[in-house]
Image: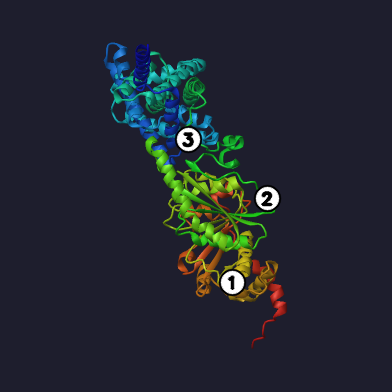
């Protein structure tokens, strides 16, 4: 009995193993979805330039489809011959990895549905890709219209494509475009499920063959046709763009998003993202998902150990983002000095690590563990600095494709009172891609910022130039703290236009010092150009404190357009301060009208009364 039963079990196991071997070559729905989301993670974190030029190449490749479809249709006896070559441009795009708008109705949307990317981030991605596709298609149409590529018969056929689309009712255009969007997004899904290039080629070819055979419409092809029509006939393209291209755009989008992305999302199981990449990661909150960085953050980084912090309303929290814990101990020490003057001062050091562009699934766990472990070891020095200053110091690690922008995200998420950061011309922040340069331009700073050009950060002799203003107020607060905790000597400097105003400048400076608790600071007044005057006064200083200009500090730093040459002319460390301003969006985009500050002018009468001018002969 034992023998037969044992053989039966063995046969069942063998059959089961054989079944697993057969199915092992087929990816499950969850596995396909994981591949889609992993690819979306790469795409949605691509820089604007990278994304735009990839989309531009895709738009120009569409010209190949337009060219072949028109040329072969014009010369062949039957339409089917031209239809057979229609998919060629799309094959170039998908196999070549270019960015086509209708492809992007699947991967980025899947990432957004998982609340790993915000809706504004998705729209930004779509707009960049669509702009690149349209420009590429427009350039292709320009080449076909004026390059002598088409003969008269072919040109007539090409014009007929656009005229046919314009004559189609908007409702029919929308429905036909929705089916085309379904086809393209479905191709993307199957493309991730395919394991070999031959299968991918066959799927892409057959799928895109269905668009001309079914008299369907693709938005980039339609846009190219409309531009060609306008260039050749001289007609106004706006009615065609509104009545033809826009319904096709909406149809493609709805078809791709609803009929494929949402359906495929709901056919996966709850375990669809149980992979190392997204293990234990905090999804975007509903406000972040809807508003992006305006509400905190717009994207979930690869590794993020920044936990939600319950703020004590009486605590004074300083955020210190660092890119290299070995070389940025100075800013950590400065932050601890500032926090030590507060009864509940706290320092939060975040190690921001530039993420690899692509991690293979096999190596991902090893890379995560290695980066996390190495970061934890490097941050031990920061924790020792906090202990030396008897300051509550916590550390976190964030691995992200972003760099400079991540500082704003961290500041909005953790709501500090002050951000203290190092700035190195060759460092991570300054070499960052400005993935979304409008973030700093259109949003107010979330808190005070201190940016250090670290040349030792010795606070023993501080020079603080001021002409009044909130940024100088922040510098005064920092100078007072350093005077208390580091025995710093503070010198105040005010520069006037003319030597005749030096006494008035001194009166202003003494009044300003009294208002800011720096009565015992040394007073220096100089005249002439501001920057040479600061450089002369800073000769014996160990630290120079400067306030932001009216047009901001951080945006100038990231674009390497800071106009204060004195930062490079002095040998001492420099602290650049900026407080959240009330500048309007228009002023941030185009700059505010320049105006000279003459705070000493209000003190001329007081200075004259205190020290009458000596009478001169004659």
Residues packed near mark 2 inside 10 Å, few (<14), some (14 to 19) or many (20 plus)? few
Question: Is tag 3's residue or tag 2's residue first in the polypeptide sequence?
Answer: 3
**Disc 3 designates what residue?**
125
- Which element type, helix, strand or loop, lies under badge 1? loop
The x and y percentages for residue 403 are 47, 48
Please state if 585 lies on the left or on the right of 565 as rendered. Answer: right
Residue 492 in sight = no
Residue occupied by mark 1: 488
Residue position for label 2: 312
Compared with residue 58, is residue 539 higher up or lower down, i.e. above or below? below
Q: Nearer the viewer, residue 414 or 97?
A: 414
Question: Residue 227, relative to residue 550: is it above or below?
Answer: above
Q: Quadrant of the C terminus?
A: bottom right
> How many numbered discs?
3
In the figure, residue 224 lies in which quadrant?
top left
Q: Nearer the viewer, mark 1 or mark 3?
A: 1
């Amino acid at each position: 009995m034992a023998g037969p039963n044992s053989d039966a079990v063995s046969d069942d196991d063998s059959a089961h193993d054989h079944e697993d071997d057969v199915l092992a070559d087929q990816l499950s729905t969850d596995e396909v979805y994981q591949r889609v989301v992993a690819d979306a993670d790469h795409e949605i974190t691509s820089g604007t330039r990278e994304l735009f030029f990839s989309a531009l190449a895709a738009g120009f490749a569409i010209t190949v489809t337009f060219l072949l479809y028109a040329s072969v249709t014009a010369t062949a006896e039957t339409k089917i011959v031209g239809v057979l070559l229609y998919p060629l441009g799309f094959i170039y795009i998908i196999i070549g990895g270019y960015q086509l708008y209708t492809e992007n109705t699947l991967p980025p949307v899947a990432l957004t549905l998982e609340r790993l990317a915000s809706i504004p981030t998705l729209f930004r991605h779509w707009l960049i890709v669509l702009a690149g596709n349209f420009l590429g298609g427009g350039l292709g149409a320009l080449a076909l219209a004026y390059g002598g590529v088409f003969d008269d018969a072919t040109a007539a056929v090409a014009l007929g494509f656009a005229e046919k689309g314009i004559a189609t009712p908007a409702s029919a255009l929308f429905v036909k475009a929705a089916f085309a969007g379904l086809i393209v997004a479905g191709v993307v899904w199957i493309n991730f499920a395919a394991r070999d290039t031959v299968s991918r080629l066959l799927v892409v070819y057959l799928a895109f063959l269905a668009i001309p055979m079914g008299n369907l419409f693709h938005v980039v092809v339609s846009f190219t046709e409309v531009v060609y029509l306008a260039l050749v006939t001289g007609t106004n393209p706006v009615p065609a763009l509104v009545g033809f291209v826009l319904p096709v755009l909406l149809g493609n989008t709805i078809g791709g998003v609803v009929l494929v992305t949402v359906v495929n999302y709901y056919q996966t199981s709850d375990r669809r993202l149980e992979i190392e990449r997204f293990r234990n990661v905090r999804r975007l909150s509903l406000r972040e998902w809807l508003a992006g960085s305006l509400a905190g953050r717009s994207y979930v980084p690869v590794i993020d150990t920044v936990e939600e912090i319950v703020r004590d309303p009486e605590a004074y929290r300083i955020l210190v983002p660092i890119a290299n814990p070995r070389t940025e101990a100075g800013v950590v020490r400065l932050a601890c000095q500032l926090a030590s003057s507060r009864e509940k001062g706290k320092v939060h050091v975040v190690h921001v690590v530039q993420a690899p562009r692509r991690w293979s699934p096999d190596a991902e766990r090893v890379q995560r563990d290695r980066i996390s472990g190495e970061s934890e070891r490097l941050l031990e020095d920061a924790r020792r600095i906090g202990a030396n200053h008897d300051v509550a110091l916590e550390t976190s690690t964030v691995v992200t494709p972003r760099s400079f922008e991540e500082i704003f995200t961290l500041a909005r998420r953790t709501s500090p009172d002050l951000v203290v950061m190092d700035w190195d011309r060759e460092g991570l922040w300054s070499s960052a891609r400005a993935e979304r340069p409008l973030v700093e331009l259109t949003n107010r700073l979330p808190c005070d910022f201190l940016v250090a050009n670290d040349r030792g950060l010795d606070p023993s002799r501080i020079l603080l130039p001021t002409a009044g203003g909130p940024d100088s107020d922040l510098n005064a607060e920092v100078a007072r703290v350093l005077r208390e905790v580091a025995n710093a000597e503070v010198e105040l400097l005010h520069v006037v236009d003319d030597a005749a105003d030096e006494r008035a400048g001194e009166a202003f400076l003494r009044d300003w010092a009294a208002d800011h608790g720096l009565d015992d600071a040394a007073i220096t007044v100089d005249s002439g150009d501001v920057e040479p005057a600061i450089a002369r006064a800073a000769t014996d200083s160990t630290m120079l404190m400067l306030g932001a200009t009216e047009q901001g500090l951080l945006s100038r730093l990231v674009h390497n357009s800071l106009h204060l040459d004195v930062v490079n002319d002095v040998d001492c460390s420099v602290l650049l301060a900026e407080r959240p301003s009330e500048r309007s969006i228009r002023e941030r985009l185009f700059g505010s009208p320049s105006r000279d500050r003459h705070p000493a002018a209000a003190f001329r009468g007081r200075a004259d009364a205190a020290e009458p001018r000596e009478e001169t002969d004659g």
